[in-house]
């Protein structure tokens, strides 16, 4: 009986030595930024941002026009007209400040709403790859100080393929695309 226990323990120890835990890593932020869905979200956000900027610009033009008129005619106005025009300028300034605060919050909320399903899709894809590959942990490369490439598998290429990211698409090429779009818009 003792021989059986010793043999069973030796087999278990030997089996656990063969079954090394599997670790993987991925650059999650890169995946999310390069996903085709992220391009669509960026386009929507840019359109909303441009619309907000146009609205802000028209509000500023209104203020500047009324302020210019105020400076030119202030000396000819009665105190009641002067007070009315100053109140009007103050009201416009307050509307501009309120607009800036609310649009900033709205754009952040819109970004979160647009990006949430993208993050979820990337996470679900990584979960499936990790489960199918038998990995016990998948680490985000961007938050690690050190990775031993020999003991950890890079899941980024498999995730890129599963998420429909073109093989030649990189963060650098994305940055160049965004800069080109910015220059074309100006």
Image (cartoon, rainbow, N blue to C red):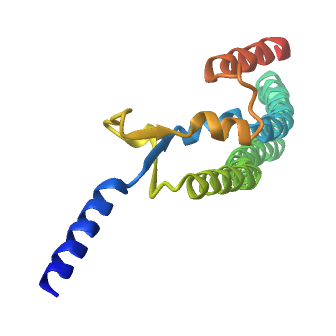
**Can residue 30 be seen from the camera position used here?**
no
Please, is residue 74 above or below residue 97 in the view? above
Closer to the camera in the image, 126 or 78: 126
Q: Residue drawn 62% across and 51% down?
A: 129
Closer to the camera in the image, 153 or 147: 153
**Can residue 28 be seen from the camera position used here?**
yes
Closer to the camera in the image, 33 or 66: 33
Please, is residue 63 above or below residue 111 in the view? above
Q: Is residue 105 left or right of residue 57?
A: left
Q: Residue drawn 79% across and 27% down?
A: 64
Please, is residue 144 above or below residue 117 in the view? above
Q: Residue drawn 61% across and 55% down?
A: 132
Q: Position of residue 77 (x, y in %)?
A: 83, 34
Q: Position of residue 177 (x, y in %)?
A: 75, 17
Quadrant (top left, top right, bottom left, bottom right) of the N terminus: bottom left
How many numbered circles does the render carry? 0
Q: Residue drawn 21% across and 72% down?
A: 7
Q: Quadrant of residue 143?
A: top left
């Amino acid at each position: 009986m003792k021989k059986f226990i010793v043999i069973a323990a030796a087999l278990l120890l030997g089996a656990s030595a063969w079954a090394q835990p599997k670790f993987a890593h991925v650059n999650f932020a890169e995946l999310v930024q390069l996903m085709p869905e992220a391009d669509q979200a960026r386009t929507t956000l840019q359109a909303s941002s441009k619309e907000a900027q146009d609205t802000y610009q028209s509000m500023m033009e209104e203020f500047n026009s009324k302020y210019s008129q105020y400076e030119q005619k202030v000396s000819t106005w009665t105190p009641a007209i002067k007070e009315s025009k100053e109140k009007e300028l103050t009201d416009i300034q307050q509307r501009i400040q309120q607009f800036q605060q609310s649009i900033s919050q709205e754009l952040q909320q819109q970004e979160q709403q647009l990006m949430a399903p993208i993050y979820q899709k990337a996470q679900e894809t990584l979960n499936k790859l990790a489960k199918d590959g038998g990995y016990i942990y998948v680490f985000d490369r961007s938050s690690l100080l050190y990775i031993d490439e020999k003991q950890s598998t890079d899941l980024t290429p498999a995730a890129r393929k599963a998420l429909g990211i073109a093989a030649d698409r990189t963060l650098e090429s994305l940055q160049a695309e965004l800069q080109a779009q910015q220059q074309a818009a100006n």
